[in-house]
Image (tube, grey):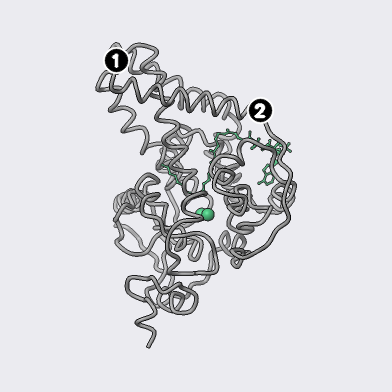
Amino acid sequence: MAPHTVMETGVLNEVDAEIKGNSDSRHTIQEKREYSLVWRNILIFAYLHLTALYGLYLVFASAHILTTLQVLILYPCGGFGITAGAHRLWAHRAYKAKWPLRLILTLFNTLAFQDAVIDWARDHRVHHKYSETHADPHNANNGFFFSHVGWLLCKKHPDVKEKGSRIDLSDLYADPILAFQKKHYLILMPLVAFILPTFAPMYFWGESFTNAYCLNILRYCITLNATWLVNSAAHMIGWRPYDKNISPSENKFVSLFALGEGFHNYHHTFPWDYKTAELGKYSLNFSTALIDFFAKIGWAHDLKTVSDDMIKKRCLRTGDGSHEVWGWGDKD
Ligand code: ST9
Ligand code: ZN
Ligand code: ZN
């Protein structure tokens, strides 16, 4: 049976109590910053995206149907390693998982190559706590390009490192699976994210190296851009039914590609909810469906969520009036 804890009080868990910080940053004026470009990353990401475009061409020109099918399967697998793994389980502790699920999610996470979970979660906890300040690694106040990919192409602002060094990561280092992933990342990541997905199609169905390699890079770039859209588009475009004072927005387009992570106004308002969304439980929210499945078989438990009453009160107090149920019309 799936244990399902509903938090009626709205008391934050330890992680979210720590990362709940600047929530009124939308109108903050900040001084301009200097960017120190990292040319290695600029060249690598340019190469990856050009290769991905060629991979897209090869899908129609010459790739085996099974290689395309592999892209379509591995993209959500890597995605779940980010959404259900690095994000909901580890960065926010929105639910608990038994070791077999943690192992699967770590494997999927390694496939996504977005750096070790511990580093990803550190940046993400800083992002929530200091949202849209210089300490936010992908500060959306610096514009769409910066929050999408630009932040990976230059040195981090000193505030990111300074504030980030105060974030408690002891819960993550205490997990032997995560500690193992971080320690051996430079071996595990190339193997899981690039070598195996390239050589499997060549070995099992005789795919050419070029097709297998370029389609796998395409798969990687799709997952990257789906993730980055949460930082860029979902921090700029969409309604703010839960808190109109913050930039994160409800963006269904992003949710579709990001496996349910585009309901970002809700997520920044109630970051401990394992669903990262409210209405239409499985609507575009494949990650919630996955966690619920594992809760059913007992591998996920202590799922945290938010009561309807608390959501209603918050919408009426700070929302922009666009909530489907608790818009301003229902205030009385
Ligand atoms: C990638 C990550 O793409 C994407 C994350 C997106 C997050 C999205 C969240 C949205 C919600 C979830 C939605 C999910 C949807 C998923 C949908 C899926 C379908 N605090 O880093 P360095 C220290 S990764 C404290 O070199 P530089 C650090 O420990 C792509 N300390 O900084 C180190 O210390 P030491 C693949 C920190 O030199 C020192 O600073 N990966 C913090 O400024 C230097 O660290 C890449 O391409 C912190 N927060 O360089 C790699 N941060 O020396 C990209 C750092 O003691 N990264 N420190 O060890 C880099 O190359 C570099 O980090 C850099 C900055 C150039 C960006
Ligand atoms: Zn988050
Ligand atoms: Zn955000």
Q: Is mark 2 within 8 Å of ligand 1?
A: no
Q: Amino acid at mark 2?
A: Trp
Q: Which residue is mark 1?
A: 204
Q: Which residue is mark 2?
A: 39
User: Which is closer to the viewer, label 1 or label 2?
Assistant: 2
Tell me the quarter of the image containing the C terminus: bottom left
Q: Amino acid at mark 1?
A: Phe
175 or 327: which is nearer to us?
327
Q: Position of residue 311 (x, y in %)?
A: 42, 73
Q: Residues within 10 Å of mark 2 (few under 14, many from 20)?
A: few
Residue furthest bottom as drawn: 332
- In this rendering, would 190 be left or right of 5? right
- Alpha carbon of mark 1 to alpha carbon of mark 2: how far? 38 Å
Q: Position of residue 64 (x, y in %)?
A: 26, 18
Q: Which mark is residue 30?
A: none
Tell me the quarter of the image containing the N terminus: bottom left
